[in-house]
Image (cartoon, rainbow, N blue to C red):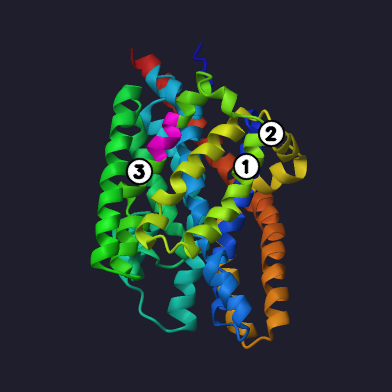
Amino acid sequence: MLRSRPIAPAIDHVLPQLTSLRYFAALLVMVSHLDFLKQSTAAPLRRIYDGFLHEGYCGVSFFFVLSGLILSHAYRDALLSRRITVTAYLARRAARILPMHWLVALPFIAWLALAEGRPIEPLLVTLNLLLLHAWAVPGTLHFSLNGPSWSLSVEMFFYAMFPLLILLPRAVLARIATLQFTGIAAMALAAAILVPGFSPDIEWLFYVNPLVRLLEFITGMLVYDAWRQGHLRAWAGTRFELVLVALVPACMAGFVALDVPLPLRWQLAYLPLAAALVFVFACGDGMISRGLRSRVLVGLGEASFSLYLIHRPIFTLVARLSQPLSPAAEIATAGGLLAGCSLLSIVVHRHVEAPVTARLNRALASHAVARGLRQGISR
């Protein structure tokens, strides 16, 4: 009789405090998209957005580092021992992100074609739906349709690279990460000198480019090794959790106040903080970790993927329909958007994302069992 061998349990059940942190990372990304505040008639609101809220994109670094830890926990041993094939692994990862991406992207295509009368560009749609658009330099392509989906394109690259990266010894991975960090830092400093200020091409190179962002994923894999082997455990606990949580807003405001060059802020400046957060909260020894294990926060964390995908079109629509606003109304709108999208994400997760993912995983499992039976009979 053919028996399926389970892979490692889902990280949501093993490290619920990290699941909760996913919500707060998504919240950071959301506040960075409150860009209607940049055009506020109130100078203090403009300063708050430019000097603090805009830096919420640092939440992406946390997601990428966490992704390296999650995949290592859930799939590394299973892939190395061949309890799961590379094809089955890739199918599961695609089933995790593609359906929701398509469900959000298709209304954009319909809107462009019907409401705005724009011709549908085959290259744009193809790259976007296949999650290849992060490789395209023009912003009209890598930020196409649902803008935040560029990071899903980067994640798909991580998924494809993971079966190769796990074959490398930890020392080699650490050397690659060190060389990447050094090379990216040198390039970022050169870019800041040669192209001062904002440049769309420089933004793609240091913020969107999957090859550059691979550093965060490899860092997450190294963080997993340190966590699994108990290294640096003395650096975990309540005081370290408190310091790291306080450092997030301090760095967001401080990097802007110190005028840290954008190419450094887009990735490298936040990377050590993201890695430390993932490691310390993976250990889960402190008071904040215990609070993060509450059912409400874990539920919000489980819905963070839906939140990440649905918030941007809602923000854009509300901003277009409600302008102009008084400063007080802008503050109320911002708060309402954050709360409303958070609640809506729970509904979308429970009634769309989770059922679709579960159904696809069952179909993939049934296909794997049937294929195994056919192979057994042929032998």
- Residue 353 visible in the picture: no
**Label 3 sits on what residue type?**
Leu
73 or 256, nearer to the observer:
256
User: Which residue bears the numbered disc 3?
Assistant: 214
**Label 1 sits on what residue type?**
Val
In magenta segment, residue 220:
yes
At a point 59% along the width and 71% down the height, the residue shown is 48
Q: Is 43 placed above or below 290 here?
A: below
Please tell me how crowded label 2 is: few (under 14), some (14-19), or many (20+) other residues with Cα within 10 Å: some
Q: Judge from the rendering whether residue 233 lies leftward or rightward of residue 205; answer left or right.
A: right
Please tell me how crowded label 1 is: few (under 14), some (14-19), or many (20+) other residues with Cα within 10 Å: few
Work out which residue is located at the far front of the displayed protein and give it. Answer: 258
**Label 2 sits on what residue type?**
Thr
- What is the magenta range? 217-222
Whether the residues at callouts 1 and 3 have beta carbons within 8 Å, the answer is no
Q: Earlier in the sequence, mark 1 or mark 3?
A: 3
In magenta segment, residue 307:
no
Disc nearest the viewer among 1 and 3: 1
User: Which residue bears the numbered disc 2?
Assistant: 238
Q: Quadrant of the C terminus?
A: top left
Mark 1 to mark 3: distance in Å? 27 Å
Helix or strand or loop: what does disc 1 sit on? Answer: helix
- x and y percentages locating residue 114 in the rendered image: 47, 80
Disc nearest the viewer among 3 and 2: 2
Q: Is 321 placed above or below 150 here?
A: below
